[in-house]
Image: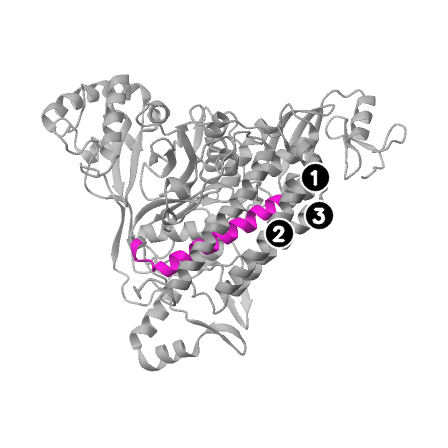
Amino acid sequence: MSEKSGAPEGKTPEPSAEKVDAAAAAKPGDTATSASLAAQSTSEAALEGGSQNIGPIGSPEPEVIEVRHGMFGGGPGSGDTSGFGGLVTTVALPGASERPYGGWFDEAVDILIELLDASGTGFAAAIESVVVDRGELTLHVAREHIVEVCQLLRDDQDLRFELSLGVSGVHYPHETGRELHAVYHLVSVTHSHRLRLEVAVPDGDPHVPSTTGVYPANDWHERETWDFFGIVFDGHPALARIEMPDDWPGHPQRKDYPLGGIPVEYKGATVPPADQRRSYS
Amino acid sequence: MSTHSTHQGPPTATGHIVDDEATGIPSFEASGGDWSDIAEEAARLGDERIVVNMGPQHPSTHGVLRLMLEIDGETVTEARAGIGYLHTGIEKNMEYRSWTQGVTFCTRMDYVANIFQEAGYCLAVEKLLGITDDIPERATVIRVMMMELNRIASHLVCLATGGNELGATTIMIVGFNAREQVLRVFELITGLRMNNAYIRPGGVVQDIPPGALDAVRDAITVMKKDFGQLEDLMLANPILQARLKDVGYLGLSACMALGITGPVLRSTGLPYDVRKAEPYCGYETYDFDIPTSTDADAWSRVVLRLEECYQSIRIIEQAVERLQAMGPGPVMVEDKKIAWPAQLAIGSDGMGNSLDHIREIMGTSMEALIHHFKLVTEGFRVPAGQAFVSVEHPRGELGVHLVSDGGTKPYRAHFRDPSFNNLQAVSMMCEGGQVADVVVAVASLDPVLGGVDR
């Protein structure tokens, strides 16, 4: 823990700019240089910083995933006669957290900072933000470093996340540049800890390195995430569809993929399929 | 067995079909009969490499699992599992229903252990809502009792079908008979034998009816006798021992690498059980043990499942005692903006809202009527964020990942089903073994395809 880092506040670029940058195009070549710079700046700042927010994108603002208009999903033709059609609702997930995170989270993040800085990757380059919400620790990882982060989390004796509970996806179609999220859940049986890794990639370039080399258990889970969301896991031994037929067009769990269904007649009335009923959110 | 009009060569026991579309590769269709007949004929035709498709409609694949085996004589050289035949898009469907309706969907995933999906899902919803500590004690104890009853039912199905697949019909009959006790209790308490949708966000749908605790006690007495019979039939059975011992070996490091949990992991000696590692529903207050073994074979998994049944009975007995001591009380959170308003009763035309409740909302309380209407048509809203909750499923660790956008429906619901993950071990357990051992290895994983495919 000689080069323990903490608060890069002074050196960080402004949060929003970095966020867009990281999301829009992650270029491995670029980040290699900026990563080592960031690593140094992190450690320098840490000496005077003390315990503050870590990630360079550590904006305390929540992560906005969508802005909705109207009341019940809104818009003309929605059948909304409530008169609340002008409402604007911001849908936001909890954003980056401030130190202290509480419990074992601080120590685990400190160890990860030390390991990532020592490896030359740099914590700031690899971890976009640290989110603590509802007692769960989430690390948002830059996609080019996901394998390394997994490897460190698995192998370090103080972290020991030796069991992977798999990968799944979430589609946020309105979060421009970060539409597709791959979500990893890890368990440390040794320390009885759990954490979540999240990798966000743009819809136009949905590539994430495969973690099957570190966690062979993720084999089928990555195939499922490819099948349902269209996230391509580069380096996967056989990234074939797993639930849908091989020749299936599209990725069904995406938000723009219709649920399907037919109207059902019941006692003289017709009930529309679930995705065409009036929606309340 | 079928023959084909283009059947060529001399008549044989199996009859083979030359598949012209696949460049004249002979293919065989077998249903029953001796494998050696097919092996002989393949040898006669000069084929060295045989690829066998087992399933998806084979009775010993626990549903619609397809196993692709590459075989050299009687030895399996490569084994691959094909899934997806039971994929019904439950997770996608849940995104279009309210949080409460989600229970009726996820209960249909692993239909043999349905209460666990309900419990995991509801715990995750409650975590998102931040009401985990507000769940009435009585509801939590009922949940534990139902889960452990379901665990016994699930293990019994595993043992029963596992025995049946090896030709031991008596084991199947005794196992299913014992499971019947659980299903009767379920029917008494929830109104349904399977797909109960009994656990709801905020508690359980209704309190246990009068006489339910006695019914559970009676069921335990009968089941204990059935367990004894099953043990006599299985553990002292030399044929079963010969078929199961040292078959389907999967060591600790392989289990950790492949993310295998549940009885298969515990058969390697690691006492990892979510009930102990990350207690939920107050499991830390119950007195029970985690049985383990170090043999890591199919036989030890049978023994473990039987022992786990006894441990579940210990938990059920403690839960019944607590419910008895507790007396009647609320089984749903107090918050009327979340609690499902139905107060069910049996009327002349079946089960429905009780007349008392209808009298209250229609006659005396406008607030209650509004809440009833809003909850039933729109549902409650859940603050935006995500939660991950694990419960110990009979087959391993069931993880429920829920994402909310602040609305009345899940933005994303993902179930990390243990069967789905555990099926990845088929290759490692079967390759290098005998064809007949494939059935044993798969049975010891106990996959339920409803959960695998969701």
Mark 3 falls on what kind of element? Answer: helix
Seen at 77% across and 36% down, the residue is B30
Disc 3 versus disc 1: distance between alpha carbons? 11 Å
Q: Check the image and report above or below for A88 versus B274.
A: below
The amino acid type of the residue labelled 2 equals Asp
Q: Nearer the viewer, mark 3 or mark 1?
A: 3
Q: Find disc 1 in the rendering and name its residue.
A: B166
Considering the image in quadrants, where does the C terminus of chain A appear?
Answer: bottom left
Tell me the quarter of the picture where residue B223 sits: bottom right
Q: Which residues are magenta?
A: B133-159
Seen at 61% across and 48% down, the residue is B228
Q: Is residue B106 visible?
A: no
Disc 2 versus disc 1: distance between alpha carbons? 20 Å
Q: Check the image and report above or below for A62 versus A156.
A: below
Disc 3 and disc 2 in contact, CB within 8 angstroms:
no
Q: Find disc 3 in the rendering and name its residue.
A: B170
The amino acid type of the residue labelled 3 equals Thr
Q: Residue furthest left?
A: A48
Q: Find disc 2 in the rendering and name its residue.
A: B226
User: Where is residue B16 shown, x and y percent of the image?
Assistant: 81, 32
Q: Is residue A267 left or right of residue B57?
A: left
